[in-house]
Amino acid sequence: MMPASMAAGSDPGSEPDPPKGAASADPSAGQGAGSVLVGVVMGSDSDWATMRRCSEVLADFGVAHECRVVSAHRTPELLTEYARSAESRGLQVIVAGAGGAAHLPGMLASHTIVPVIGVPILSRALNGIDSLLSIVQMPSGVPVATMAIGEAGAANAALLAVAMLARRDPELAGRLTAYRAARAEQVRATELGG
Ligand code: AIR
């Protein structure tokens, strides 16, 4: 079982357990400085069912990352601490998933210049439209790169993070190119039943 504050990604085969509550989400815990490149955070452990897709894709690419619960409304101080320490801890990208009044990605972005990718969680009451609009409608000056609602968005957030990291990592760029080629080959090889 992987504690929420531990880095993942070094073992692509390992399947991370759900992140626990905010109490275990100490921004300075769990890894040496500079080892974690992507911070995957979410507003609640109920978001993990979606956000684990992001962690899985990052792990497939061998990208060192951490998964934590940080709530914009329930733990605002932790949010501030996490965002303000992100750059000095060596994070290159933050992926933030939240549902409903999904203020986590925008508030993280307001505290750091580390790029933030937002994942709108599929909410029960409004089918994720509330999450999407809360994340995407940022004021000019503080951007959040907003993904699709739900699991596709979580997977794409990881792929976008990989693409960003790959600009300075030719090996990772090669893996991303191979991934795209494999997806294309899958489509070409598709045969529809009669
Ligand atoms: N949330 C948590 N803190 C602030 C917000 N907006 C979101 C979570 C989750 C939803 O509220 O991101 O998608 C419901 O959380 P819970 O813990 O009640 O399941």
Image (cartoon, helix red, strand yellow):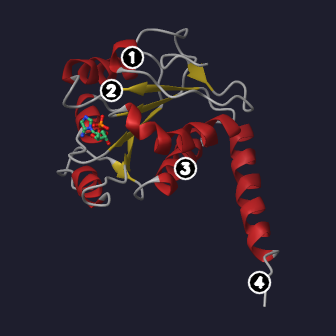
Per the rendering, the mark at residue 192 is 4
In front of the other: 47 or 177:
47
Name which of mark 1 and mark 4 comes first in the sequence. 1
Hey, what amino acid is under mark 2? Val
Q: Residue furthest bottom?
A: 194
Q: Where the C terminus falls, by quadrant?
A: bottom right
Name which of mark 2 and mark 1 comes first in the sequence. 1
Residue at figure coordinates x 31%, y 57% from the top left: 128
Q: Are marks 1 and 3 in contact (CB under 8 Å)?
A: no
Q: Are marks 3 and 4 in contact (CB under 8 Å)?
A: no
Gap between marks 3 and 4, in whole Å? 26 Å
Give how far across and how far down residue 190 sits, in percent.
78, 76
> Foreground mark, 3 or 4?
4
Per the rendering, the mark at residue 155 is 3
In front of the other: 53 or 92:
53
Name which of mark 1 and mark 3 comes first in the sequence. 1
Q: Residues within 10 Å of mark 2 (few under 14, many from 20)?
A: many
Name which of mark 4 and mark 2 comes first in the sequence. 2
Hey, what amino acid is under mark 4? Leu
Name which of mark 3 and mark 4 comes first in the sequence. 3
Location of mark 2 (residue) = 70
Location of mark 1 (residue) = 25
Relative side of 117 to 175, left or right: left
